Image: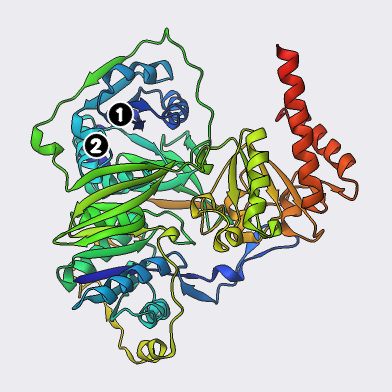
Amino acid sequence: MRIVVLVKQVPSTDKVKLDEKTGTMVRSAMEAELNPLDLYAVEEAVRIKEKTEGTEITVISMGPPNATYAIREAIAMGCDKGVLLSDSAFAGADTWATACTLSSGVKKLGEFDLIFSGERATDGETGQVGPSVAAQLDMPALTYVSKIREIGDGKIVVERAIEGGHEVVESSLPALLSVVKEINEPRMPNLTGKIRARKTEIIVMTAKEIGLDRSRTGLTGSPTRVVKIFYPSLSRNGIIVDGKDPEKTVEKLLQFLNDKAFI
Amino acid sequence: MKINEGKFQGVWTLGEQREGDISPVSYELLAWGRELADKRGTTLASVILGHNIKEKAESLIHHGADIVYVVDHPSLEHFTPDVHSNILEKLVREFMPEIFIASATTYGRTVMPVLAAKVETGLTADCTELDIEQDTGLLIQTRPAIGGNVMATIKTPEHRPQMSTVRPRSKKPLSKDESRKGKIVVKEYPDELYVSKVKFIEFIKDETIALPIQEADTIVSGGKGLKDAKNFKLLHELADLLNSSVGASRQAVDMGWIPYSHQVGLSGKTVSPRLYIAIGISGAVQHLAGMSSADVVVAINNDPDAGIFRVCDFGIVGDIFEILPVFIERLRERKTVNVKGGS
């Protein structure tokens, strides 16, 4: 089975802090990591590989030249190959242009049975790239997948975590799966994996090499434009009470909820 | 599609149905749509795909639509990404709306990116604010990113339709007006368009969820401070009394105290309830990212320095195991009194 995992390198989410003065969130721009929600996609692909002989997993990412870090993390967990789509022409891409770029990269690398993505990236938080890639490659977009029940014979049965429960669907392959955290517990890379990741050569491909027209990528190819960015303050100057006397405290809380018409 | 490919007009909303009933999010979306259509001086249409849904289409008009496009077919009873997006593509190419919005539900967030890829236009995810720019008439889309750290305002200048998904609960539905008149257009397509690569097998209802947290009015949320899975029972009791859903921090989910579908935060769900009660949650920024758009936040925690107290409207510094039972008891008494008073 041939599998692709689409990953993104994002600013490290553990480094986020609340700015004391402004009440806005600040994060160190220097630290980067593999999008935490992509770990579940990588893990699920590796689990299939462990059960299915002859499976090869290719990790693909679009990003600046230093985005090989995220790809190596995925390889350390058990993926085989890494491809970084990197070109100054890709800069500033919105989800549509990103999907064009990634799907061109996938096409260039050949035919695949399964494509995995995380539910969304923790920076942009759109969750749109996975389903868009599926559309570009004309395969079903199975989103919010929380379990793979069966796989084989050109088909897959999955559970999707949707509002109010889980929907079970069967799809033909190839298909794209965007997975949610519920699906598994990602492993920590072991030493062998880390060494392999360090030794594996990451293939870097440009717009030209994947046969992508520059008008369909980067800022030029993006239908949307960010026109303004602002930083909202999260701080609220709330009432803080001491809860030493539970009876009195609850009285105050009930009064507060009553004033706001909640009870 | 590019703006110069034809005359694009009208605002569209994507209706949602579940088992033949129109989902409430469809009405919230119409409230957004109505506002945009009025500002733009154009009509508002809603699209609904489903089975045995024709009879229900009228209610979309009662909630603000001028036109409803209905596609009613047995194979549309359940969501299939390919068939739903193929039909939406047909509709969009035929009627050429200028703006097309959907709810940022699992349905909207799946079918819209597929549709946007097919018709080659932009899509802005999970908007919390939509407006029409006065001089250009363009759709102004505002959305939080990086867990509410950053708000971005986004336009789609040259591609049509201008598409966005809108966060559920970001607007109240208009009140139902049964005297509103509108047009229902039933569209039919050749059978081959309904053939999907995806087959529905079954739906397993999650019995632990009152309402999915993304749709809940009130959320009672628990964290590490609850110390044990069995203490979530207190939270469920409180939730029942407040008619609310139960949320949780990442730690509580990671400990296996409650399923992932309840997780609020950067790696869980983003919620916008009217009331959010955080119990034993310290308030790491990753958690705050998922709940900071709640109207009112109440926090109970024994650590006076917990981050959650910075973002709450009412905070109690104290032992949750002393306060919760009293809180539950008082609410129960009030309920009994109210029931008696009402009889």
Amino acid type at circle 2 is: Leu
Residue B52 quadrant: top left
Q: Nearer the viewer, residue A108 or B120?
A: A108
State which chain disc 2 sits on.
Answer: B
Residue B71 quadrant: top left
Q: Which residue carries the number 2 mark? A: B88
B304 lies left or right of B46? right
- At x 21%, y 45%, the residue is B199
Q: Position of residue B198 (x, y in %)?
A: 20, 47
B229 lies left or right of A214? right
Give the distance between the C-alpha atoms of the residues marked 2 and 1, in whole angstroms: 8 Å
Q: Position of residue B325 (x, y in %)?
A: 77, 43
Return the disc, 2 or 1, that comes first in the chain's sequence.
Answer: 1
Amino acid type at circle 1 is: Val
- At x 38%, y 36%, the residue is B101
State which chain disc 1 sits on.
Answer: B
- At x 60%, y 71%, the residue is A15
Circle 2 crowding by C-alpha within 10 Å: few under 14, some 14–19, many from 20: many
Q: Which residue carries the number 1 mark? A: B47
B266 lies left or right of B74? right
Cβ–Cβ below 8 Å for labels 2 and 1?
Answer: yes
Q: Position of residue B166 (x, y in %)?
A: 45, 40
Q: Position of residue A118 (x, y in %)?
A: 38, 62
Residue B237: give its label: none
A67 lies left or right of B129? left
| Colouring mode (rainbow / by chain / secondary structure / one colour) | rainbow
Q: Nearer the viewer, residue A192 or A6?
A: A192
- At x 67%, y 60%, the residue is B224
